[in-house]
Image (spheres, rainbow, N blue to C red):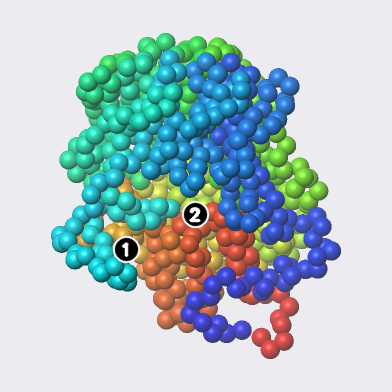
């Protein structure tokens, strides 16, 4: 079949022979429409006394084609489960007051951001402030009388000329857009409004928010230090945007608004949290060595910034988030550890103890390690009461409760109705030695229903993005869809992945893509050797960093029957000058500008080896992607066409880099990939005339 158009937009799903199976055979199958049935728990917040959990219950709105978020409550003793705020538009960022008598959360009212307070005894709520711009998660003062948050403060747009006034009713063109900021658009937000993020304080009786930071540089992430001071994060230096990861922690005196830097080093310091007795500040950060990846460490310091100590210097894993234990003698932290998302306890001497390793489940599309937790602040003491998102391989995240670090009790059953009667993929862990240097590489294999190791099954190698991120044994709608249509699907943590130590992650520093390709091919070789898959029915796909490695792979080998590169970087020069994280890429991934080292940028660009490509390769991208913009995919598509390689360009209208953020987009992405693979599957019966 010859393609008749230069751009194929969401039309290949009919090519999958399995997808068009009769409806009666789909009763126990994870079909594409079942994506809309999925729910998951997220952002659980436990009351100070540990008696109640409030969490975001997220589901798929079939009419609006969106993920919506309602707030639900769970009684931790009885397990009673009921809605708190639902059916009024998505609500989020719920936070308990210090004594647990009130809750504050963010929602929308009449299309505008709304910061609301709710009384736990009566259930009544009122609007603290309807805001012109969206606010960050609110933070209570220790006395419960004030709330701090950050939001955008608009500024006058840049202009060099004042346009004449148009006549009434005239239909003039839109005015010109003058840009003078280094970062002027961002993925998921589009072109950014002119302005700076600053911190505000608001009475819990309502009223007008008071702005407490100012200046040309932004501040965010407020935390209270007593009732009369705030800790905020920012980078108050000239040309701050040239060092995109740099930040310091500042103390704001609310009476005078005087600002004092508590940290002063080259590297990010952020996420401060004050112990219950106010004696210590914990925070995250690291010394910037201009690497593509560095571990985030956990520190403590005195309230005046003195005596800073690294508590995780001997714990060779990065800290994602943390909270103080109620007694202030240890912190509970989230970390990726060897393919699992874990909760650990870190005492003030730096001793690390693993509490749980079954967190996760909030990344619905692909099996990334993603989750959250909270700790009761007035109960538990040395036996912390923790709520968290619990992961299992065949369900999205549930909400769980752990007491004293013991195995979590699952408090919800959000998907039994949707998934309980389906034949889902069985997940198997494998570890292989890399053909490059013998390093151990961890991977998971999703085995389709009815699988048997007879060497007949098709295989999809699905590669994660980042490239510094981690897959794990988590529910993934995309992986389950592949398995439902009969594919053995391998997902791998090659070198460069997080969770296996800093040295492993830094193996691709200044060498990406590179030897990670060998790691991936070693997994493919292992599956063929195990007789799990047919060597003639190999397919490859991946998104973002995985899209880079997919394009790289088909330039290095012809072993795959077809490929689908999703939202890739194809030309590092254009990415490092026009992507939304362009400055980060040039500063940390290359440590030189494209005009300073053009050969290095070209050496690592998949476009440099496109002449080698023979594999039929689909290219897919979101039309509103500003992380790996559409012109990256377009360059590759054009190059493939010129090389007379079978290809198609699939553009997802309105999609950002989170190309499958809406349920229908997830379905379209996966079904188009499988449609493309089906077209080139050597075992597929050929339609007449093809």
Which of 670 and 189 lies nearest the eye of the viewer?
189
In the drawing, does residue 495 fall left or right of residue 201? Answer: right
User: What is the CA distance from the residue labelled 1 to the residue labelled 2?
Assistant: 20 Å
Comparing labels 1 and 2, the label whose residue is closer to the camera: 2
Residue 383 coordinates in the image, percent (x, y): 59, 14
Is residue 262 depicted above or below 170 in this figure? above
Is residue 319 rendered to the left or right of residue 679? left
Quadrant of residue 18 within the rendered picture: bottom right
> Callout 2: helix, strand or loop?
loop
**Residue holding disc 2:** 658
Q: Residue at x 64, y 70 (%)?
A: 13
SS type, badge 1: helix
Residue linked to disc 1 = 574
- Name the residue: 49% across, 54% down: 658
Q: Position of residue 654 (x, y in %)?
A: 48, 62
Q: Is residue 140 visible?
A: yes
Quadrant for the C terminus in the image: bottom right
* Local crowd size for mark 2, using a 10 Å CA cut-off: few (<14), some (14–19), many (≥20): many
The residue at the far left in this view is 160
Q: Residue at x 74, y 70 (%)?
A: 20
Q: Is residue 439 above or below residue 527?
A: above
Residue at 43 percent across and 59 percent down: it is 625
């Amino acid at each position: 079949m010859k393609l008749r158009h230069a751009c194929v937009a969401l039309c290949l799903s009919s090519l999958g022979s399995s997808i068009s199976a009769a409806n009666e055979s789909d009763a126990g199958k994870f079909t594409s429409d079942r994506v809309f049935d999925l729910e998951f728990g997220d952002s659980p917040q436990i009351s100070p006394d540990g008696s109640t959990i409030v969490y975001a219950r997220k589901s798929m709105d079939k009419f609006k084609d969106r993920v919506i978020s309602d707030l639900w409550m769970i009684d931790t003793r009885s397990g009673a489960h009921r809605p708190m705020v639902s059916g009024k538009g998505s609500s989020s960022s719920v936070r308990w007051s210090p004594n647990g008598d009130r809750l504050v959360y963010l929602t929308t009212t009449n299309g505008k951001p709304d910061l609301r307070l709710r009384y736990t005894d009566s259930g009544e709520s009122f609007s603290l402030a309807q805001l012109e711009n969206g606010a960050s998660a609110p933070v209570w003062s220790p006395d419960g009388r004030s709330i701090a948050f950050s939001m955008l403060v608009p500024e006058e747009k840049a202009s060099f000329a004042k346009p004449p006034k148009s006549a009434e009713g005239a239909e003039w063109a839109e005015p010109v857009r003058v840009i003078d900021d280094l970062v002027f658009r961002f993925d998921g937000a589009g072109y950014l409004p002119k302005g700076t993020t600053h911190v505000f304080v608001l009475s819990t009786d309502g009223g007008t928010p008071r702005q407490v930071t100012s200046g040309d540089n932004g501040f965010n992430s407020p935390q209270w230090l007593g009732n009369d001071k705030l800790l905020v994060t920012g980078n108050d230096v000239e040309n701050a945007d040239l060092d995109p990861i740099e930040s310091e922690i500042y103390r704001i005196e609310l009476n005078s608004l005087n600002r004092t830097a508590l940290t002063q080093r080259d590297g990010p310091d952020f996420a401060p949290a004050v112990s219950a007795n106010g004696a210590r500040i914990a925070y995250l950060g690291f010394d910037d060595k201009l690497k593509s990846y560095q571990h985030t460490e956990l520190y403590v310091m005195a309230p005046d910034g003195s005596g800073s100590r690294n508590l995780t210097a001997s714990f060779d894993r990065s800290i994602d988030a943390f909270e103080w234990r109620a007694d202030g003698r240890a912190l509970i932290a989230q970390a990726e550890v060897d393919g699992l998302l874990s909760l650990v306890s870190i005492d003030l001497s730096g001793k690390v103890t693993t509490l749980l390793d079954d967190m996760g489940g909030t990344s619905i599309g692909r099996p990334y390690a993603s989750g959250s937790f909270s700790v009761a602040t007035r109960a538990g003491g040395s036996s912390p009461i923790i709520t968290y998102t619990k992961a299992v391989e065949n369900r999205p995240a549930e909400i769980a409760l752990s007491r004293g670090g013991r195995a979590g009790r699952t408090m919800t059953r959000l998907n039994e109705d949707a998934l309980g009667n389906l034949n889902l993929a069985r997940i198997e862990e494998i570890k292989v030695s890399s053909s490059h240097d013998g390093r151990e590489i961890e991977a998971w294999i999703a085995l389709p229903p009815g699988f048997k190791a007879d060497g007949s099954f098709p295989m999809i190698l699905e590669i994660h993005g980042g490239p510094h991120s981690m897959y794990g044994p988590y529910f993934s709608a995309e992986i389950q869809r592949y398995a439902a249509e009969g594919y053995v699907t391998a997902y791998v943590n090659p070198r460069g992945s997080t969770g296996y130590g800093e040295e492993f992650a830094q193996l691709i520093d200044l060498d990406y893509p590179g030897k990670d390709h060998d790691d991936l091919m070693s997994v493919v070789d292992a599956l063929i050797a195990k007789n799990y898959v047919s060597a003639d029915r190999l397919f490859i796909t991946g998104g973002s960093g995985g899209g880079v490695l997919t394009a790289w792979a088909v330039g290095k080998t012809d072993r795959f029957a077809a490929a689908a590169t999703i939202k890739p970087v194809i030309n590092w020069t254009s990415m490092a000058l026009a992507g939304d994280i362009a400055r980060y890429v040039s500063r940390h991934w290359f440590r030189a500008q494209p005009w300073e080292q053009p050969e290095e940028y070209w050496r690592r660009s998949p476009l440099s080896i496109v002449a080698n490509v023979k594999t039929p390769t689909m290219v897919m991208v979101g039309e509103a992607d500003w992380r790996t913009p559409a012109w990256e995919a377009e360059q590759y598509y054009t190059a493939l066409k010129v090389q007379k390689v079978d290809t198609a360009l699939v553009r997802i209208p309105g999609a950002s880099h989170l190309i499958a953020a809406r349920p229908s987009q997830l379905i379209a992405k996966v079904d188009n990939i499988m449609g493309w693979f089906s077209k080139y599957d050597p075992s597929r019966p050929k339609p007449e005339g093809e």
